[in-house]
Image (cartoon, rainbow, N blue to C red):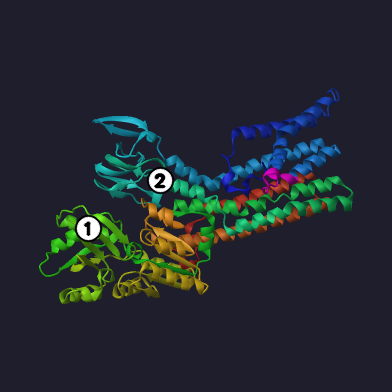
Amino acid sequence: MIGRFSSLGAYKELFEAKELALCLAGGALALAGFLAGRVEAVPGWLPVALVWASLAVNGLPIVIGAVKGLIERQVNVDELVSVALIASVIQGEILTAAVVSFIMTLGALVEELVSDSARRSIKALVRLAPDTAARLADGREETVPVSEIAVGDVVLVKPGERIPVDAVIVAGVTEVDESSITGESLPRTRREGDPVLAGTLNYNGVIEARATKVGEDTTFGKVIRLVTEAEVQKPRAACIVDRWATWFTPTVLAAAGAAWWLSGEASRAVAVLIAGCPCALIMAAPTATVAAIGRAARAGILVKGGQYLEEAARIDTVLFDKTGTLTRGEPRVDEVLAAEAVSADEVVGQAACVEQNCGHPLARAVLRAAHYARITVRKAERMLAEIGLGVTALVDGRPVAVGSVEFCGGEAALTAPLREGLTRIRERGATPLVVCRDNEPIGVLSVSDQVRPVARETVARLKALGIARLGILSGDHEKSVMNLAAAVGLDQAWAGLKPQDKLDILAREQAAGRRVMFVGDGVNDAPALARANVGVAMGAAGTDVALETADIALANDDIGRLPLLIGLSRRMLTVIGVNIGLGLAFNALAILGGGYGLLSPIMASLVHNAGSIVVVLSSASLAFVPEAWLFPKKARP
């Protein structure tokens, strides 16, 4: 009952009207019993019955909670209150027991009400999901529950309506507000062929869209599940507090016994038992964690658990992937070099056949080039992607490979004209993709990408936050990587890396005592994301791998959120520290006050609940603190 906040994953729907009504009814019974005892005409048994009824309403659930805690061997502060109530009853202080149980129960409900503010962002997400959708079937529009929409169904979405499922627009043009998923406040134009996400707002157009994902499989469903499950994952501070809490019961029992033995007054022992309940201490970390995770979710930062936020606060090294992370991830093929007796269209066509089922930005660039050149992309067989290197497949029964120079046999395998072109491509900082057929190079594609506009500013703000070591890990060639590092202000750069090389570099950094955050696109950086102290994936919106692989995902591909992530995580640790200090101070002062007879059992219960509410309010501040306050002045946006 009182100790329900010791486990975030076990909380129920908060502040139910039925609970409040029962609590108030119990308090009214105690008051009626007190007043009835002052009236001579009232039979003597009536006040006693009313007080006992009050104790049954508010005190019995506390005792039951204590018994369950003992049976399940879980930390539960109800034991201390239960002992205090039982001791009061044995003393004959039934009215005191009834009043204390009323105050403790009412205090718990108030704590729930205040704590609910820390979870409002999650509830707000749930409320964004529409209950019904307009489905088009045989030219007719029918309104059906969203649960009945299947993959392949076409839905009609009008201006001002929420999009019910992940879908691809088949007709219409509109502006879509994606802030519920990505945190991006400005609407984005979406037209035929563009994807749209469940839970986002159709701004001003009428669109028809074919469902690609429904229910919990939508990006919106995964975001809700991810943020909700994150509550169960406690940060290290919460685990430490839990261990402390296990010592509180015997310690407080000993203090209560000492107060009784030294003073000879049982009421002092009862006050110590009530004041010693470590609710404020137990709530110190979980409530702050929930508030911080909810705040991050509203900003488009999806965190899998409080421990990852805690780790982010201690990061001193940030390493970035290149393509799709520091760059826009929308590269273009700007030059095609073909071997003798091979046309440029043939080189592009062969590469597109191999790359058609890949999600990497370079693959999309090849497919886009084939589309613009009106080249037919034929079906490929036995496609095999080697992370960080390239892709192979059978095209018309012949083996074709697309990837780095090393993947296709090295520079020695290229003809002199292709080698010259390769050097030229590298010198201007573009990325070369070699295309081989039957193990023979038939051409080279030059692919270039633009640096994200926020990249340089993000790096500068990370440095202002005290991140001393920032670098780039890339499989691209050295010239391209060095140009990019210089453009955004990175001090360290590693080029030409295979996936294992990235892991080796991360291992060396960690062996040197550094805490490393790796930021990648979540598609071909899974090993590095898993190895880093904190893995941050780009492209969470619609990308399953990003949500599954990384510890943290940026829903809007916005690396500009990284300083906010680190600032928020540091603020969370500060709030947890303050909360722990407040919890210990309230407990210590209240125990001393009860032991010295300065606090009656009723006053002790008031002080106990006041401490818990102060801690919850402190945590709730994380959900409302202005973003600028999360940074030192030199790092503020």
Residue 74 located within the stretch drawn in magenta: yes
Q: Is residue 184 visible?
A: no
Image mark for residue 29 = none
Q: Is residue 269 visible?
A: yes
Give SS at disc 2: helix
In-image side of 501 versus 233 (left or right) = left
In-image side of 64 versus 598 (left or right) = left
Between 51 and 555, the one lying in front of the other is: 555
Q: Is residue 359 above or below residue 389?
A: above
- The three-letter amino acid code for the residue at tag 1 is Leu
Residue 590 located within the stretch drawn in magenta: no
Whole-angstrom CA distance, mark 1 to mark 2, is 37 Å
Image mark for residue 394 = 1
Residue 388: image x %, image y %? 33, 65
The residue pinned by badge 2 equals 220
Between 47 and 451, the one lying in front of the other is: 451
User: Where does the C terminus fall, quadrant-wise?
Assistant: bottom left
**Residue found 85% across the figure and 39% down from its top:** 91
